[in-house]
């Protein structure tokens, strides 16, 4: 779909391209953001612009706060599987132990705070897809590793931890949310429309109340419900004993907001081993673009086996696909 851009937008774009300093670039980008018509056809441009604004804002602030401890890019984890979920929480809440239970990764687990110093990725199997989980150092009001800002940008979603063995658990979890806000990372309930502010980055978030095996966990959970409200979907688990982990696995996949689509060649069986995982609501054309960049424009129709169609029904390029659909693309 074509986007009609107002003439002033192109002026701002030209200023952006000529700008010599990050500050001037950011000023031009913000102007472009204001001028950009916000509708369906401009969604891609909106997303690109928002990412640039948010990245540049981070860059300017990080430069202000002095040299980084880790070189830029040290903790970039190329996305693998259906998406990336980052673990955020107060010290000693069981983030690392949970990672060892859901993946083959083996971060250090210890009965004292500030054990994890660097991000640790792991891959979680869920049915025929995989979800990348990233264990992080703890966040408190006073302790925040600058690379958390980068890792959270790359992530698709977050798990916010609550420690049910700690009377101060709710306050510690609230402090995580507040500290992330300072870094312009907003933890939001899944399915929320993205924020309008292009300098903040919103992460769909699940709340995981861990250590439900603690003898006073029930009382603390009640107190936590009052203190934290019902902003995020809540999962009560015990990383140690295994309670709630099967449901949590499904939720960690669900929070990504993606679906599975299998492709097939004419006259051949579908490849049921390696689904594409586009966002829910994606069309035939969107999936074609994932198969090959050129296919997104080239695809004219598809035969689909699955939900909302007769088996093998021919549909147009704008047909919205469903989870577990099999598609045969035709150009
Ligand atoms: N009883 C109980 N203990 C747990 C549970 N999960 C973790 N622990 C214990 O809590 C302590 C901290 O666990 P970690 O996984 O290291 O916690 P963390 O959140 O990664 O801590 P930092 O790296 O310091 O942020 C360890 O002694 C774990 O064995 C649980 O579900 N129940
Ligand atoms: Mg840890």
Image (spheres, rainbow, N blue to C red):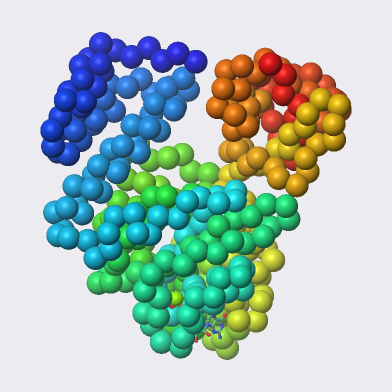
Quadrant location of the C terminus in the rendered image: top right
Q: Quadrant of residue 33?
A: top left
Would residue 50 appear left or right of 312 to someone viewing this image?
left
Measuring from the top left, give residue 170's x and y in whole percent: 41, 72
Residue positioned 31% across, 37% down in the render: 52
Seen from the viewer's position, the closer of residues 263 and 203 is 263
Question: Residue shown at 36%/66% (left/top)?
Answer: 176
Examine the rendering and report whether any part of residue 48 can be seen: yes
**In-front residue for pair 148/183:** 148
Left or right, residue 171 beside residue 163: left
| Whole-percent x, y for residue 19 in the image | 15, 29
Residue 120's place in the image compared with 35, above or below, is: below
Q: Tell me: 321 left or right of 180.
A: right
Residue 177 x/y as whole percent:
36, 61
**Rendered image quadrant of residue 53:** top left
Q: Residue at x 57, y 18 (%)?
A: 297
- x then y, percent, for residue 227: 42, 68
Which residue is at the front of the view, 331 or 37?
331
**Count of numbered marks:** 0
């Amino acid at each position: 779909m074509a986007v009609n851009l107002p003439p002033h937008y192109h002026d701002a774009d030209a200023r952006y391209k000529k700008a010599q300093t990050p500050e001037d670039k950011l000023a031009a980008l913000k102007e472009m953001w204001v001028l950009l018509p916000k509708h369906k056809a401009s969604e891609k441009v909106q997303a690109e612009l928002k990412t640039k604004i948010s990245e540049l804002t981070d860059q300017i602030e990080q430069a202000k706060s002095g040299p980084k401890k880790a070189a830029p890019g040290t903790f970039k984890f190329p996305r693998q599987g259906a998406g990336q979920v980052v673990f955020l929480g107060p010290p000693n809440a069981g983030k690392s132990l949970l990672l060892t239970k859901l993946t083959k990764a083996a971060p250090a687990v210890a009965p004292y705070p500030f054990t994890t110093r660097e991000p640790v990725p792991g891959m979680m199997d869920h049915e025929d897809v995989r979800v990348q989980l990233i264990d992080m150092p703890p966040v408190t009001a006073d302790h925040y590793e600058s690379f958390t800002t980068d890792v959270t940008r790359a992530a698709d979603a977050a798990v916010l931890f609550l420690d049910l063995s700690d009377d101060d658990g709710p306050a510690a979890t609230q402090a995580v949310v507040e500290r992330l806000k300072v870094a312009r990372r907003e933890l939001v309930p899944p399915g929320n429309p993205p924020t309008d502010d292009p300098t903040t980055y919103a992460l769909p978030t699940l709340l995981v109340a861990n250590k439900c095996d603690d003898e006073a966990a029930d009382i603390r959970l009640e107190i936590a419900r009052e203190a934290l409200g019902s902003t995020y979907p809540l999962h009560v688990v015990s990383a140690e004993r295994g309670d709630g982990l099967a449901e949590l696995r499904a939720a960690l996949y669900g929070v990504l907001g993606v679906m599975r689509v299998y492709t097939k060649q004419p006259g051949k069986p579908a490849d049921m081993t390696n689904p594409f995982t586009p966002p829910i609501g994606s069309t035939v054309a969107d999936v074609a673009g994932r198969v090959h960049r050129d296919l997104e424009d080239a695809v004219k129709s598809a035969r689909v086996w699955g939900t909302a169609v007769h088996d093998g029904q021919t549909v147009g390029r704008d047909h919205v696909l469903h989870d577990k659909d099999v598609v045969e693309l035709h150009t």
